[in-house]
Amino acid sequence: MHPQHPPTLDPLDWTTIQPHIDALLAVDLEPRQVREWLQRWSDLASVLDEAGTQIYREITENTADEEADARFKRLVTEIMPRIAQAEQALRQKLLAVNGYEPTQETAQLLRYFRAESDIFCEANIPILSELQLMGKQYMEIIGGLGIRWRGRTLTIPQAEAHLSDRDRTVREQVWRLSLDAYLAHRQELNDLFLNMLARRKRLAQNAGFPDFRAYQWLAKGRFDYTPEDCFIFHDAIEREVTPLATEIYRTLADNLNLPSLRPWELSISGPAKPTVDAYEQPLRPFGEPAELEEIAHRIFNRVAPAFGAYFAEMRDGYLDLESRPNKAPGGYCNSYPVSGKPYIFMNAAGTHRDVRTLMHEGGHAFHFAEAFRRQSLLWNYHGPMEFNEVASMAMELLSAPYWNKTNGGFYNEEDFARAYAEQLIDALLFLPYMAVVDALQHWLYVEAGEEVDAGDIDRKWSELWDRFLPGIDYSGLQTEKETGWHRKGHIFGSPFYYVEYGLAQLGALQIWRNALEDQENAVAAYRRALAAGYTEPLPRLFEMAGARFAFDREIVGELVTLVRDQLAQL
Ligand SMILES: [Zn+2]
């Protein structure tokens, strides 16, 4: 089904791309030609995507490679804006075809092509690029923050590593210095955000939507759930997860002989996950990255031999796991849609976090591998965002039972229990924090009114924090508490993009639940859902994977009870 002869062109030379676009636009498109025309478009877009994957790989594998950097800049500034324009023209051409009946294969892509077309508005193009630059400004402010600590300058991520120090005084000092660094920019961040807020309201107005939430709902392709569903989810989290989160914080404080957990026992800029535990030493799952690769391969094989086989192919030139000078930070999974290969990038340093990153990215990689085998249109090689994260988060959980040495994994039985418990606790603790971030934005863009100022946002954040995360002792730290929204990049750069992870976590936990009962059938269902790519709507993908697409008290309560039971067994 995949193209035998991909179009020949130079992805960095628009004059070689243009004729292919023109040819597509010149077709007098009849309903019966739509499928074949879509394939030609998909083949062209795949060649460009494949080149983009390679160039991004080169600049992240070696940030000092100046030639790769020049290619990247050329791609972003010269080619991509033209592609965006051409794609809008191609979408409009397709949507204007009279009498075309969508098939199973094309129904979802037509749905989001239409959404993209509906929100498109000429007057918004300059506002969107202003917002992009403002998002970059936020990253520059945050990326530039640092503290002086024992004669050295530390970035915030480096400072955050000290929050795992066994000495509480170290933790408190480093945390206070870090927060002071943020607070020194309080005014600037407030102004920046209020400017972004005004522009977002204008985007919605220009495109004819009642508010920015309604606009963004369509921009994010949220066809199968509503803002009301999010409120039901928040409520379920408050009632079912918050009490357990408070209990987890309480138990940890007791184990550490502390009267209560204070913010310096938690990560600074993300989900309210503890940075300390009751153990003397951190987990050490492996030494060299080669060992991580070898053991991960055995584990993927245990989850399903098919996953082991995909990973074997990736070991032949499609993994870059080690940390080394001039490598970009972080981890990601990308894909080559012509050759059908997924690729994983990360910076392994020998920690348990590396294990989780590789399992997570592995889930994304196998999603692509499964979909690529079954689908032939580029737009169907991945699912909707909410389901892409089910693929990866479920792989973290599905692999967890094999992390012990008895099953070919990393850990002795004691460390295994510790790592598994941490995985389950983190899955739960993410939810109340997610609810704070999501609820703030529903309020901001719909209820808060035109006159909203930074003080109102501070008060709302603080109120939501008390509602969902009352278990952390912030006494005497009101300023630090109420400015927590400054430390969540999504609120600035990716508005509303966060509940996806919460919905995905519920899907992942259900797949894991099924596997505890019947590994073979649970994994088979998960694989069928991965292979469907985006040829089914979101609720149906959940259903195929053996999960219910629901976020009410019943499902959240059921999963919390299951996690509680499993934790007790560990
Ligand atoms: Zn992911």
Image: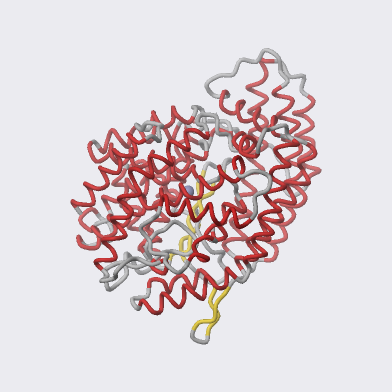
Q: Is residue 345 left or right of residue 553?
A: right
Colour scheme shown: secondary structure
> Residue 392: x percent and y percent?
42, 46
Examine the rendered structure and indicate whether residue 406 appears above or below residue 107: below
The quadrant of the picture occupied by the N terminus is: top right
Q: Residue furthest bottom?
A: 151
Question: Which quadrant holds the C terminus?
Answer: bottom left
| Relative horizontal placement of residue 570, taking residue 425 as reference (left or right) | left
Q: Nearer the viewer, residue 61 or 112?
A: 112
Along the viewing direction, whichever of 282 and 368 lies nearer the viewer? 282
Q: How many marks?
A: 0
Question: In the picture provided, is 86 more to the left or to the right than 257?
Answer: right
In front of the other: 551 or 30 = 551
Q: Position of residue 304 (x, y in %)?
A: 32, 42
Residue 240 x, y percent position in the rendering: 33, 43
Residue placed at 54% from the left, 64% from the top? 329
Residue 124's image quarter? Answer: top right
Q: In this rendering, would 21 be left or right of 315?
A: right
> Which residue appears at 75% of the width and 45% of the height?
81
Vertical arrangement, residue 393 with respect to residue 94, above or below: below
Residue 55, percent from left and from top: 64, 54
Quarter holding residue 553: top left
Q: Is residue 366 above or below residue 96?
A: below
